Amino acid sequence: MKEFIFKYKYLIFAAIVIIHFAFKFYKCGEAGLWYDECFSVQLAQKSASEIIRISMEEDPNPPLYGVLIHYWLNLFGDSEEGVRSLSVLASSLAAGVLFLLCLNFFNWQTSVFASLMFFTSNELYYYGLEARTYALIILFVLCSYYLYLSIIKRPTLLKAILFAVANACIFYSHFLACFVLIGELLLFPFFAFTAGRISRDNENLNFSVSAKSKVIIYLLSQP
């Protein structure tokens, strides 16, 4: 089982994304839009610059979701399926990223268990259909965690750039999600200045790359 999962992990990732998308998209048009989703549609009908202005002056929420749904509805229409399909796609990708995160930094058992928990969670299913920013936040947070641990394991400039993009997306999606960034910052010295090892079955993933390299890459990644 272990060898199969590691050998075909990217095929499994794709399968997870496809299964989640098919399962959620099948039901996403059955119920009518509720109040907050109607607000998303109303906001999406404005120009991107107007959405940003409203976010800065009237709406307490950051503008990223509004801008994305604006262009999304231009492509896919404002039916229930069109409005909710952005969240469905984000939730499906989040399930795949969670699988890779657990597999690469913990073990195959954790990846299987976490994937099953994600798939069977009523709350994650609900927010995976809702035409609001929450599914995108889950995706961006999981991407941030994945890149955060990747930088600690083996820092590169590309990872720093992608990490900065993921964290900027978190910041411009929902301000409360910024606690994730604070948590990463507080934990970073522990990971950077200790020769910690994370066990993956009987193999050790060595995170003892020089602390200097980690610090430099991490600082470069801050948006």
Image (spheres, grey):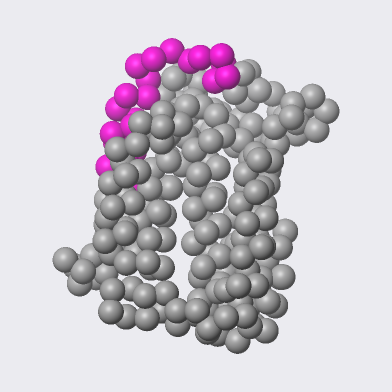
Residue shown at the point (35%, 56%) measured from the top left: 99
Q: Which quadrant is the C terminus positioned in?
A: bottom right
Q: Which quadrant is the N terminus positioned in?
A: bottom left
Residue 210, image quadrant = bottom right
Magenta residue check for 124:
no
Q: Is residue 189 visible?
A: yes
- The residues colored magenta run 17-38
Q: Is residue 157 visible?
A: no
Q: Is residue 220 above or below residue 154?
A: above
Give the dominant element type of the magenta stretch: helix, strand or loop: helix
User: Residue 165's spot in the image, x, y percent?
Assistant: 63, 57
Q: Residue furthest bottom?
A: 210
Q: Residue furthest right?
A: 57
For residue 62, side relative to residue 6 (left or right): right
Residue shown at the point (30%, 27%) measured from the top left: 26
Nearer-the-camera pick, 97 or 190:
190
User: Residue 22's spot in the image, x, y percent?
Assistant: 29, 36
User: Residue 66's spot in the image, x, y percent?
Assistant: 64, 31
Residue shown at the point (51%, 14%) measured from the top left: 34
Residue 214, image quadrant = bottom right
Count every numbered label the image shows and give the total.
0
Residue shown at the point (40%, 54%) measured from the top left: 98
Magenta residue check for 37:
yes
User: Residue 104's spot in the image, x, y percent?
Assistant: 38, 68
